[in-house]
Image (tube, rainbow, N blue to C red):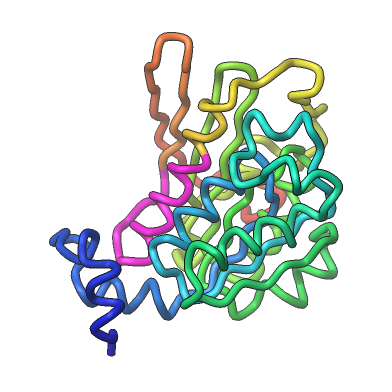
Amino acid sequence: MLSDDALLRYSRQILLPSFDVEGQENVAASRVMIVGAGGLGCPAALYLAGAGVGEIVLVDPDTVEASNLHRQVAYRESDIGQPKAQALAAQLMALNSGIRVAAWPRAADANWLAEHLPGMTLALDCTDNFASRDQINRACHRAGIPLISAAAIRLEGQLAAFDFRRPDSPCYACIYGDGAAPDTLCSESGILGPVVGTLGTLQAHLALRLLTGAEVGGTLHLLDATTLTWRTLSLKRDPACPVCGH
């Protein structure tokens, strides 16, 4: 049962027919893990906290650097040198003191994910390398927890949701294999802040849609920010996939 204060605070999204009071209650009861507190994780976490997600778990081993500030918009100059997970957690609590936030300033390796992912409603992969994405994909598939993954580099981005509650859902490895591909780093290739911010914001959008009962899986969304155009590809489960195949 939502309080009068909550009904007022979240009234603008409750007004949406696809959201309503039931959707807000589902959001408030959810537990969302966000792996990566950088250019994707900052906007995703801020919007999910603003929307009233009941518990947000932040996982990132890095500290804030000056070169992060042009795109990782949750941080301030005073945060430089601080663990990202803790600095972002402080911003989320300042935005919404009515939610729970846990900060883990460490890497989310396979053993840690196996211990802490069960019990989550949803996970967001906001990391920047194939090895981490592969581990998160495997852990979410194993635990049957939906995953929303995004990536951005230069003026390009991609976004997909994998609903592992469905036995026929494809997974990240169906598209990209076992995570052995070389990484393209923004420190080498560059990234425009609004591009990665757009993808992180849309991760939050898909998360809220999923938490309120919408079907969001099965499509890969590709952004060309130079021309501001999108392409979509339908995803199918690969029977030979090393993670979810037979």
Q: Nearer the viewer, residue 99 or 36?
A: 99
Identify the magenta region. 200-218
Answer with left or right where residue 86 lies relative to residue 124. right
Q: Nearer the viewer, residue 240 or 226?
A: 226
| Residue 37: percent from left, percent from top | 68, 50
**Is residue 119 in sight in this rendering?**
yes
Residue 162, placed above or below residue 179 = below
Q: Which picture quadrant has residue 230?
A: top left
In the foreground, 176 or 17 = 17
For the view shown, which residue lies furthest in the top direction?
227
Quadrant housing residue 112: bottom right
Q: Residue at x 65, y 63 (%)?
A: 89
Residue shown at 70%/38% (left/top)? 177
**Considering only vertical position in the picture, is 121 above or below 51?**
below
Give residue 201's position: percent from left, percent from top.
46, 43
Q: Decide if residue 53 is on the left or right side of residue 21.
A: right
Q: How many marks?
A: 0
- How far across and how far down the image is residue 13, in percent? 24, 60
Q: Give the residue displayed 47% in from the left and 10% down from the top.
A: 226
Side of 19 where 139 appears, left or right? right
Residue 202 within the magenta-colored segment of the rendering: yes
